[in-house]
Image (tube, helix red, strand yellow):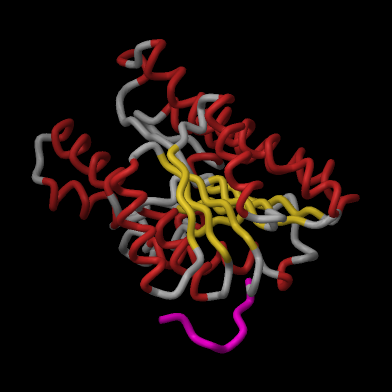
Amino acid sequence: MISKTKGRLENRTALITGGSKGIGRAIARRFVEEGANIIICARGEEALKETALELRQMGGSVITSVADISDRKSVEQMVKQVSAKFETLDILVNNAGVMSTKSFMDYSLEEFDRTMKVNLYGVFHVTQAVLPSMIQRKKGKIVNIASTAGKWGSMNQSAYNASKHAVVGLTRCLALEMAPFNITVNAICPAGVEGDEIDAMVEFWANKLGVTKEQAQKNITSRSPIGRFIKTEEVAALAVYLASDESDAMTAQSLSLCGGYLMV
């Protein structure tokens, strides 16, 4: 059960896209621990139900929404559902995303387009849908989950990198527009985070280099000063800070959570 001590997000309502697994699920857990009401959305209904059950067992107030953030109508329906349940939406975490690892010439137009539609246009759709109420109230927190891939180049990830560079740019521009309304907009830029996506990347490099997955992972993590991937809980801890009053003076920032990668 969550602590009875007042949390940093007490009585605030947060919408977390891609909230059924990975980083989104970890953020949802931490937000519940900090007293927030939670809306998690994803495309998979069963995973949403499983995550919601866990959060409710922690004592959280949770609703779920099956939605495809790349589809404008789906997003509008989701926000309508949220508005019917909660009077205000205080926090938006744009976390949902997709990643494919392949060389530039191997991308089909459909694959490249899908990455941009989810990773960039998904942020655009959801943020436009929730901003009017934040602007009216002159208060809000937007946290975009970007990536170190939005700050540097890397081989065999051109679609993903392009989308995350765009999210970093959008974060900066939107923050400037929203500053007069007391709405902060920031991005978290993790390096490789433990989970399915990094596992797929490790498998790609293992196959490409003709080595075992263990050796491929060692090759990747050896380039990090801390020598490991980032934990989802570490991303969630930073998300709590950016969603709380403690970060009221921080906006337009893209914070690297990279284990020292960018200092090498």
User: Of all residues shown, which one is farthest toward the front?
Assistant: 84
From the top left corner, tell me how far across and down residue 101 is, in percent: 31, 31
Residue beneath the point at 21% across and 51% down: 217
Residue beneath the point at 51% across and 27% down: 70
From the top left corner, tell me how far across and down residue 141 is, in percent: 70, 56
Left or right of 66 in this view: 34:
right
Residue beneath the point at 61% across and 40% down: 79
Along the viewing direction, whichever of 72 and 191 lies nearer the viewer: 72
Membership of 4 in magenta stretch: yes
Along the viewing direction, whichever of 262 and 198 lies nearer the viewer: 198
Q: Quadrant of residue 193?
A: bottom left
Left or right of 25 in this view: 92:
right
From the top left corner, tell me how far across and down residue 83 is, in percent: 66, 47
Along the viewing direction, whichever of 19 and 104 lies nearer the viewer: 19
Along the viewing direction, whichever of 55 and 223 lies nearer the viewer: 55
- For the magenta stretch, what is the residue range? 1-9
